[in-house]
Image: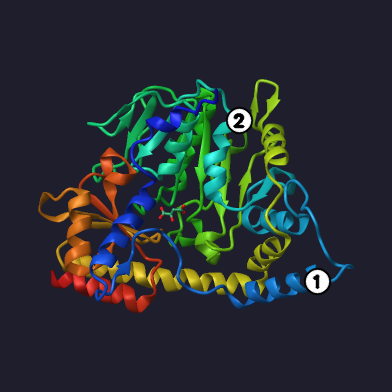
Amino acid sequence: MFKVNDNYLKLPGSYLFSTIAKKVNAFTAANPDKKIIRLGIGDVTQPLSESVISSLHIAVDEMADAKTFRGYAPDLGYEFLRNAIAENDYKMRGCEIYPDEIFVSDGAKCDSGNIQEIFAADTRIAVCDPVYPVYVDSNVMAGRCGDYDESKGTWSNVIYMPCTAENNYAPELPKETPDVIYLCFPNNPTGSAITKDELQRWVDYANKNKALIIYDAAYEAYISEGDVPHSVYECEGARTCAIELHSFSKNAGFTGVRLGYTVVPKDLKCGDVSLNSLWARRHSTKYNGAPYIVQRAGEAVYSEKGKKEIKELVAYYMKNASYILNGLKEAGYTVSGGVNAPYIWLKTPDNMTSWEFFDYLLEKANVVGTPGSGFGPSGEGYFRLTAFGNYENTVEAVDRIKRL
Ligand code: MLT
């Protein structure tokens, strides 16, 4: 008789953004005349840049010719892309990361969910609270998180590091020592950032306690302040304690194209075991690589023209972020984020719960956001708006909220 992985049965409800989509679909079906503005999921709205499109076209034509056709990609990804990443994202920032430490994938979401597979079943994880739900849910599926306490919204075997207004949405070092620490900066969902000195403390802590940091740098392109690190490898000692995740979704608008990468330095060891080798083993066994045409598109992001276009794209979304931040401030909301990240984190008014505010905003302003409690218990009473909409819709959404 077959049996299911009953860890899945422990997961409460459906994936956060699926729940939101269902609610919005139901509202739209009941109110077909209403113009809904979606500032919920962090999905981009602007088209791919010229250099990306032109690379895609060229690569498609190559696939149409037997002389230039490509089949399976190399295990770690094509060298042309890994070299461009190593050069631009690391060497130019003074970080020591080599192409054979870079694993190209179809996005940071998969990697952030899959990376837990190379750790022991009894690994104790620590997460920020609120947190991107994939880190926790993927560990729940693997049976690592213990039991769910519905009243608290927490798992018995997870160490939560509250990120609140009091600590400026930056976690404090945990009192109990975790084995694996998930950090995401600039942060999803709060939009906060940490300085290089603050990140260095985490790297020192991890090295001292033989813990490992999984550093999600998906939003690094949005950093506007000088002392905020773009990579964990800017910190001394990170090669022996950190894995880094990257996405092309948020900087280059690849949410529908799919491309990301994970860095596992060769100095990262558990006793004699190299994590780079373990991840390589996993990658080659379970994955056949991002498509050739997409990897060529990724390479184009690092061309001189591509880099300029990315800056323009990021500036476009950050103009939205400023409009939301300033508009909501004027309207009397308590808001943060939106300076080094495309997310704005606001306190719900009149002590509304996050979901109450979600319903209120959907019904009264026809604007969709993301309830903070969906990211963890410390997100209760907060709400996230994304800057990834188009400018006109963003302005209209903020103006509607101001009129409430
Ligand atoms: C979000 O809205 O938190 C992100 O878009 C989700 C993701 O990148 O998977």
Give the crowd class for mark 1: few <14, some 14-19, many >=20 residues within 10 Å. Answer: few
Q: Name the residue under label 2.
A: 118
On the image, the x and y values in percent for residue 282 come to 68, 36
On the image, the x and y values in percent for residue 327 come to 23, 70
Q: Which residue is drawn at 63% across and 48% down?
A: 95
**Is residue 172 found left or right of 217 in the rendered image?**
left
The N terminus, quarter of image = top right
Q: Is mark 1 on a helix, strand or loop?
A: loop
The CB of the residue at mark 2 lies under 8 Å from ligand 1: no
Image height of 268 relative to 230, above or below: above
Amino acid carrying label 1: it is Ala
**Is residue 59 found left or right of 317 in the rendered image?**
right
Q: Residue at x 63, y 67 (%)?
A: 301
**Is residue 47 found left or right of 50 in the rendered image?**
left
Amino acid carrying label 2: it is Ile
On the image, the x and y values in percent for residue 61 come to 77, 74
The residue closer to the viewer here, 41 or 213, is 41
Q: Name the residue under label 1.
A: 64
Residue furthest out toward the right: 67
The residue closer to the viewer here, 147 or 323, is 147
Image height of 267 relative to 110, above or below: above
On the image, the x and y values in percent for residue 57 come to 70, 75
The dot on residue 20 is: none
Taking the image in four quarters, ligand 1 sits in the one at bottom left
The residue closer to the viewer here, 293 or 94, is 293
Instruction: Tell us which disc is closer to us: 2 or 1.
Output: 1
Q: Can residue 259 be seen in this view?
A: yes
Q: Which residue is drawn at 40% across and 35% down?
A: 127
